[in-house]
Structures are given as structure tokens and as C-alpha cells.
Amino acid sequence: MPSIAVALSVLGLVAALVAGVYAVSFAVAPRGFESGPFLSGARPAEHAVSRYHVRWYTASMVFLAFDMEMVFMYPWALVVASIGVKAVVEMFAFLALLLVGVLYAWREGAFRWA
């Protein structure tokens, strides 16, 4: 039971510390400062929440798929010699799955830019 009391007291102290830091920053912060865009004072050309075309989402998904491929292939390359044939078969299965995704994106027209 004492360990729970210690944990709760530490949590309370951390919460009090965080509240204190927020109170100090609120008290010290300058008033009336109007924050503008970071364009050397120039007006932005478009709204910050402007919409993108849907094709950019599919292109970003394809990029993320290949980015994840590299994330998985680097550790695989480090241990492939110690694991053996099983690791090679698993990597080719993973690459086949990625190829299916690329062929699907190609069929749906994700790579057509015009």
C-alpha cells in the first residue's frame, strides 16, 4: 500500500510542477502581442487550411508504403545471414504484398499526374 501512496504523491508533485510552470508563463507572457504569419509580415497567398487534390493522398500512401519497406528491410538485412532461407522467403512475401499494392495503385490511376 505504501508504494501506491508514493506513486500518487509523485504524480501530484508532477501535476503541481506543470501547473506552476503554466502559471509562471501566463504571468510573464507579454500582453497585446499580435502574432502574424511568418512571411516577413506579408499577407499569405492562400488560407492555411486549403484543400489538396485527392491524388496527393494516394501518392503519399504509395510513398509511405515504400518508406515502410525500407524501415523493415534494414533490420532484415542485418539478420538475414543468421536466420537463413526463412528470412528470404518472408521478405519476398512482403515485397510481393507491396507489389500487389503498387499494381492496385497503378490500376486506379494514382501514378497519372495529368
Image (tube, rainbow, N blue to C red):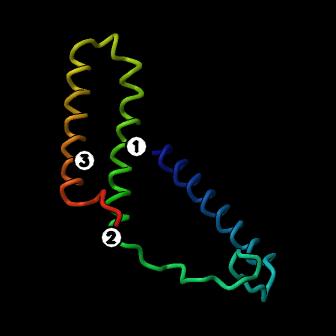
Tell us which disc is closer to us: 1 or 2. 2
Q: How far apart, in angstroms, are the residues tagged by discs 3 and 1?
A: 13 Å
- The residue drawn where x is 78% and y is 77% is 29
Contact? badges 3 and 2 (CB < 8 Å): no
Query: Residue at 42% across / 28% down in the picture?
Result: 74
Residue type (three-letter) at the residue carrying disc 2: Val
First in sequence: mark 3 or mark 1?
1
| Residue at x 20% of width, y 35% of height | 96
Nearest the eye: 114 or 40: 114
What whole-number distance in Å separates the C-alpha atoms at marks 1 and 2? 20 Å
The amino acid sitting under disc 3 is: Val
Identify the disc placed on residue 67.
1
When asked about the image quadrant of residue 17, the answer is bottom right
Q: Which residue is mark 3?
A: 102
Asked which quadrant contains residue 71, the reply is top left
Q: Position of residue 62 (x, y in %)?
A: 33, 51
